[in-house]
Amino acid sequence: MPLDQTALLIELEPVVATNLDRHLALAKEWFPHEYVPWSQGRDFDGLLGGVAWQSNDSDLPEVARTALIVNLLTEDNLPSYHHEIATLFGRDGAWGTWVHRWTAEEGRHGIAIRDYLTVTRGVDPVVLERARMDHMQSGYTNAHGDGVLHSLAYVAFQELATRISHRNTGKATGDPIAEQLLARVAADENLHMVFYRNLLTAAFDIAPDQAMRAVQDVTTGFQMPGANIEGFGRKALSIALAGIYDLRQHRDEVLAPVMRQWNIWDRTDVGADGEQAREALAAHMAELETQAARFEEKREARKQRLQR
């Protein structure tokens, strides 16, 4: 008989406590202000009578600027994310301690990236602020409702995807300072991924069919939390064309390695529903392979055209 959500939370609480201790032992304290070149800062127009932002204020490549904005706006919705996980996991015990610790660590990311972009004049601060207001007012709703296992599967994938996106964005900037900053942010995201991945590993031992179904549902319907950013489709395409985050990376560097950690393909403890979910998952991964290969071909053809 499937376990209900309360039972799953209770069963996983000791695993949360163990992994929280592990996380706190590995997490490194860092300070956003140390990654911002404050000496480059100048007053903007407005109250201080400085100079208005101009497009030639920064040497950031356009696609790197786009990726930075998408990454930052995604981080900005932290209040909504906190609300969702605090509602699902609770605010008490090990679950609650993790919720607040995760929120505190994630909060640094938006602070650091915004300070970097503002000080270096990497983006128009007026446009950025308006985008922040619009995106945060749209909020974020957990697509998996009160599904503990679905949510754990989602964040395990999403944290790894975010890690890869931040790292590759840093490289795309051509700025050693930005690369160091985003590598530091990515290190946090990796620890978060490991935490959630380990919880779902334990969940597979507790409720293998439910866990398998959760992975299948999340994988087939996966969207990044910033998908409701205005113009996200266009922005995501330019990011993919630049190789910062594309379907190949999503399949081969996010989904596949995490699934290997969960021993998805070789488990012998699943029942009929779990097996059905696994078959659907295998079909979806095969379809992603086809889509990724097709996109790579189109990207290469586009590259060849532009070089003529």
Image: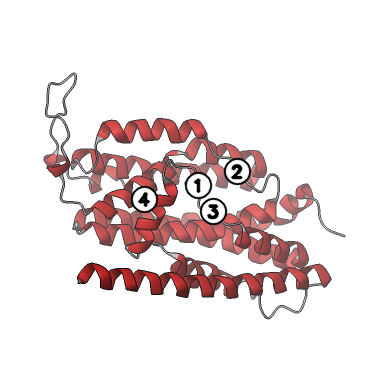
Pointers 3 and 2 in contact (C-beta within 8 Å): no
Identify the mark nearer the N-term, 4 or 2.
Answer: 4
Q: Which amino acid lies under the numbered mark 2 shown in the image of this protein?
A: Ile
Pointers 4 and 2 in contact (C-beta within 8 Å): no
Relative image position of residue 17 (x, y in whole percent): 61, 54
Q: Which residue is mark 2?
A: 85
The disc placed on residue 223 is 3
Tell me if mark 2 has few (under 14), some (14-19) or many (20+) residues whose alpha carbon lies within 10 angstroms of its own. many
Q: Residue at x 72, y 63 (%)?
A: 213
Identify the mark nearer the N-term, 2 or 1.
Answer: 2
Pointers 2 and 1 in contact (C-beta within 8 Å): yes
Q: Which residue is mark 1?
A: 102
Residue 213 lies left or right of residue 174; in this view the side is: right
Relative image position of residue 59 (x, y in whole percent): 15, 51
Could you say which quadrant of the image residue 177 lies in? bottom left
Q: Which amino acid lies under the numbered mark 3 shown in the image of this protein?
A: Gln
The disc placed on residue 29 is 4
Q: Residue at x 54, y 68 (%)?
A: 255
User: What kind of colouring is applied to the model shown?
Assistant: secondary structure
